[in-house]
Amino acid sequence: MVGVLTSNGYVLDESAHRLGSLSAVPDRERGDRVLLRERLRQDGYLFLRGLLDPEVVLGFRRYYFSLTEAATDRASYRQALFGEIVPGAEYAAFCAQPALRGWFEWFLGGKPFLHKRKIIRQTAPGEGGIGTATQAHYDLLYLREGTDQVLSAWIPIGDCPVARGGLTYLEGSHHRVLEDEARGLLKRPAASITADLPALADQYDARWLVTDYAAGDVVIHTAHTVHAALDNVSRSIRLSTDIRYQLSTTPTDPRWQSHWHDHDGL
């Protein structure tokens, strides 16, 4: 842990009723689909340690920086990211690697569909202020034109201890979101809820859950689970990707069937 946890400059309340640890799925449950589905229903997320081969993850990290570190300005960086990496074969293979795609096929009980819009997030040490870290949101806000049973996979591309700004989840938030969605109370536009994580925890009377992630870890979460990112106060770049899988027989959001670009309006 670090001395003070912040997100977009807001200092998190680290008391026991506002901060907790993200729980990994126990080894004894990893092969039981019924138990995993129930855990996902109860918790809103599945933290799967070591689902991927760390060497595959670190290999993609090296590939990413081999292209972006050659950039001399923002324009050349954007060309490397959106012109080469995002539409490239290496990223496509990483997101559909057998350990990941195979897990979704097993868990969903049918052929999985991977959305083409896949996002890579990089945060440098010391970057701060509103809009730097991912603000609190739940994914359905951006995916309303398809099934609400879409699942997101957040993958740290390299080790991501708490100080490096990993993802944090608002405990039990999906239950309230599901209830409010059913009552028609959450017809928000495609935008985050807030950057003020401490205030949101008070509003939900819930804890933000954090942990140290390692290369190879994956977190699966539902479209209703509120999550955000912490600020990177380490000395290393935080790199991650978030992608979406669902059953191929369920409706897909057509807006997510093109490569991600930061000007795509979502």
Image (cartoon, grey):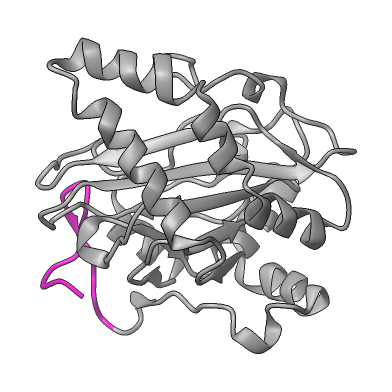
- Extreme residue in the bottom direction: 28
Q: Is residue 92 visible?
A: yes
User: At x 66% / y 21%, what residue is drawn?
Assistant: 257
Would you say 167 lies left or right of 34 here?
left
Residue 150 percent across, percent down from the top left: 71, 45
Closer to the camera in the image, 91 or 247: 91
Specify the segment rendered in magenta.
1-15
Residue 2 vs 259, above or below: the answer is below
User: At x 44% / y 71%, what residue is drawn?
Assistant: 206
User: At x 24% / y 41%, what residue is drawn?
Assistant: 123
Residue 139 percent across, percent down from the top left: 57, 42
Residue 112 percent across, percent down from the top left: 79, 44
Which quarter of the rendering shows the N terminus? Answer: bottom left
Residue 57 vs 188, above or below: the answer is below
The quadrant where residue 13 appears: bottom left
Would you say 69 lies left or right of 145 here?
left
> Which SS does the magenta portion mostly show?
loop
Closer to the camera in the image, 248 or 143: 248
Residue 142 percent across, percent down from the top left: 57, 32
Closer to the camera in the image, 122 or 103: 103
